[in-house]
Image (cartoon, helix red, strand yellow):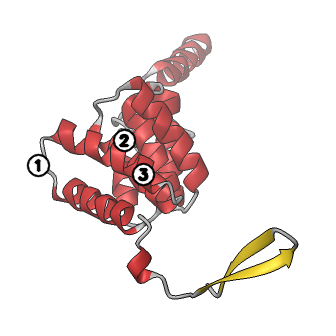
Amino acid sequence: MRFKVFSLLALAVALAACTPTGGVSRDAPYGIDARGQAVDPLIVGHRLMEAGEYELALKAYYRAAATDGVSVDTLSAIGSANLALGRLGQAEKILRRATEEDPTFVPALNNLGVALMESGKIGEARVIFQQAFAQDSGQTDSIRENLKLAIAATEASVYDPTQEKGEFRLVRREKGKYVLLTQL
């Protein structure tokens, strides 16, 4: 009789150990359901960008690239986060890679144009904005405004002699050698 009670008790303990816990890990923190679906890291990154948390958004975008693979969306998102953080060189490099992968992806084109404008590459930025505008069919206001700014900046950088403020002087240095000086 004693053996039967002990064996029934051992069987009950063994069965209790085998019963599922409902998918909840014993190692999971309190309140976390391990069965739940994870939120797409790309969406998390977009929400963090909207909240102004650019460094956290960049980490979420890296996680998206690691889990879902490197795509035009993830490259564009990583470039945008770097742009928001002021890392113009990194942003330009990553956004160029995104536009090489898909030359018709408008967000990557627009953000590449912004990175180029911020870097002082106004002429190239204008060309990129024109491509983005053409791909978007002129429907997005921000792309239209960026293109207008780039056009205005390139036209303003053209030499205009009427805006010259300094006066030129021709100075003789040696026999037959002259130097043109200005007070700019």
Residue 1 is left or right of residue 125, and the answer is right
- Mark 1 = which residue? 139
Q: Residue at x 43, y 27 (%)?
A: 100
Q: Is residue 102 visible?
A: yes
Q: Would you identify the image quadrant in which residue 36 lies?
A: top left
Mark 2–mark 1 Cα distance, whole angstroms, equals: 16 Å
Residue 55 locus on image (x, y percent): 54, 58
> Is disc 1 surrounded by few (<14), some (14 to 19) or many (20+) residues within 10 Å?
few
Residue 153 locus on image (x, y percent): 37, 65
- Mark 3 = which residue? 123
Q: Secondary structure at mark 2?
A: helix
Compared with 87, 153 (above or below) is below
Q: Quadrant of the N terminus?
A: top right
Q: Which mark is residue 108?
A: 2
N-terminal-most mark, 2 or 1:
2
Residue 15 locus on image (x, y percent): 48, 18
N-terminal-most mark, 2 or 3:
2
Mark 2–mark 3 Cα distance, whole angstroms, equals: 18 Å
Q: Residue at x 27, y 56 (%)?
A: 147
Q: Secondary structure at mark 3?
A: helix
Viewer-nearest of labels 1 and 3? 3
What's the residue type where badge 1 is placed? Gln
